[in-house]
Amino acid sequence: MIAALAANTPEISSAVTALLVGQHDIGVGIIIGSSIFNLAALLGLSALIAGGLPVRRQGIIFDGAASLMVILVLVLLVFRFISAPVSLMLLMLLLVPYIIVSSLKPYSG
């Protein structure tokens, strides 16, 4: 998690700077563009190289549901249905429990 934050610091700081100077479109573009690249290049390439991995259905549903909720919050923010502080609070309410649950060891019983 810390490595991911450090690796994304340039994108995050660029987006925050753009938002602070009133360039909302550029800030949103940076976040969306870096996310698309990370998904396509990093995860996609890793998946192609690794091949098949055993993943339980519950894990896929859990990750997919969290991802859809994050996307919903970001869409609401982009179309200005909610403010940036509200979206930040909603994302924290979503991601803190997600991180806690994701860090738990699987039940082997």
Image (tube, rainbow, N blue to C red):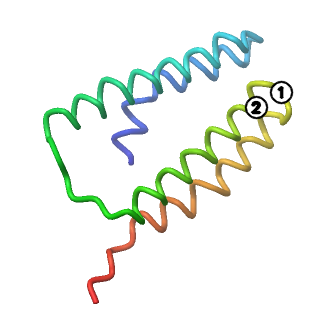
Q: Is residue 23 left or right of residue 29?
A: right
Crowding at dot 1, Cα within 10 Å, few <14 / some 14-19 / many 20+, comes out as few
What residue type is disc 1 on?
A: Arg
Q: Position of residue 97 (x, y in %)?
A: 57, 64
Query: Which residue is drawn at the image coordinates 59% and 45% (left, top)?
Result: 68
Q: Is residue 16 left or right of residue 58?
A: right
Residue 82 sits in which quadrant?
top right
Q: Secondary structure at mark 1?
A: loop
Where does the C terminus fall, quadrant-wise? Answer: bottom left
Q: Nearer the viewer, residue 51 or 39?
A: 51
Q: Position of residue 77 (x, y in %)?
A: 76, 31
Q: Nearer the viewer, residue 5 or 66?
A: 66
Q: Marks 1 and 2: CB-CB under 8 Å?
A: yes
- Find disc 2 in the rendering and name its residue: 77
Crowding at dot 2, Cα within 10 Å, few <14 / some 14-19 / many 20+, comes out as some
Residue 93 sits in which quadrant?
bottom right
Mark number displayed over residue 80? 1
Can you say whether 55 is above or below 44 in the image? below
Q: Secondary structure at mark 2?
A: helix
Query: Which residue is drawn at the image coordinates 72% and 50% (left, top)?
Result: 90
